[in-house]
Amino acid sequence: MDTIVQALVMGIMQGLTEFLPISSSGHLIILPSLLGWRDPFIDSLAFSVVLHIGTLAALVSYFWRDWLVLVPAGLGLVRDRSTRGDRHRRLALDIAIATVPAVIAGLLLNDWIEANVRQPGLVALMLVIGAAILWLADRWGSKLLRIEGLGGPRALLIGVAQAFALIPGISRSGISISAGLFVGLSRADAARFSFLMATPIIAGAGLFELRKLAGGGLATGDHLVPIVVGLLAAAIAGFLAIHVLLRYLRTNSMAVFVVYRLGLAALVVVSLLAR
């Protein structure tokens, strides 16, 4: 039962924090540390794959209408090697450009970062740095640019920023939304572009981790219930997080997430000092 409860909590945490700009990897390191959880399956690569599948399901189920347009547009772009003034082709190209830096960084650095950069103290520091970046971006960005007018150079800058999300505590959505704000996107469009370009990234990360599990399967039959619970929790929480954030950012600033990140960092520091 403990494993099922942990799978539920970790699934909800993954779904919410993957899309809210508060760092999913940071929370998944901090939460077990604060609660003293040491379940080998919850800490395993197999369960990480399950959570990735859940968040990918949230993205696809929320943006399926967009992808029904973007996938044919992307294929047409490859076939004709031209956007032909089509806004869907331009957006598909921007997403592809923004994906490249994170793919390169992930292939080169992911294993090293997983092995060496997962300490709660470092996560607290990155939460503070990410909060400062998010606050500055929200303050300085013009918020006048629409997603259709993004363009390749700006998309590349957002993609480079997204690559830094490999560091736990930075937040993939947080750093990519910040970059979108810095180049002039509105808050809602910065979040939407962040979510759209997250789809190939999260799918790729899941496939990369599945490759490491080759031949081993996800888990034994004893873990079937925690797998289902974690996957569904991540998918449902992720879908709700996307919906709520996009609506929230239409009329509100990023201040609440800046404050939350600073508060969580303080909690981690106090916890570490108390030990």
Image (cartoon, grey):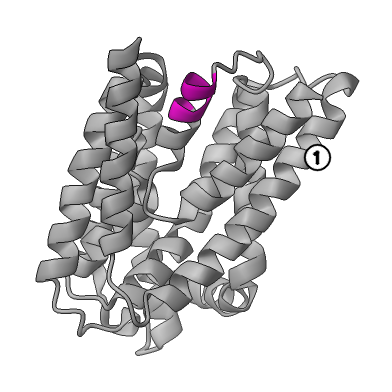
Q: Secondary structure at mark 1?
A: helix
For the question of whether residue 218 can be seen, the reply is no
In the rendered image, which quarter is residue 214 located in?
A: top right
For the stretch drawn in magenta, what is the main secondary structure?
A: helix
Q: Could you tell me residue 97's position as x and y percent?
A: 33, 60
In the rendered image, which quarter is residue 135 located in?
A: bottom left
Q: Is residue 146 left or right of residue 96?
A: left
Which residue is drawn at the image coordinates 27% and 15% (left, top)?
Answer: 273
Q: Could you tell me residue 180's position as x and y percent?
A: 25, 66
Magenta stretch holds residue 31: yes
Q: Residue furthest front?
A: 274
Magenta stretch holds residue 186: no
- How many numbered tags mark residues here? 1
Q: Is residue 66 left or right of residue 265?
A: right
> Which quadrant does the N terminus fall into?
top right
Q: Is residue 137 left or right of residue 36?
A: left
Kindly identify which residue carries mark 1.
Answer: 228
For the question of whether residue 141 can be seen, the reply is yes
Range covered by the magenta-colored residues: 29-35
How crowded pointer 1 is (Cα within 10 Å; few <14, some 14-19, many 20+) is rated as some
Q: Could you tell me residue 142's position as x and y percent?
A: 14, 78
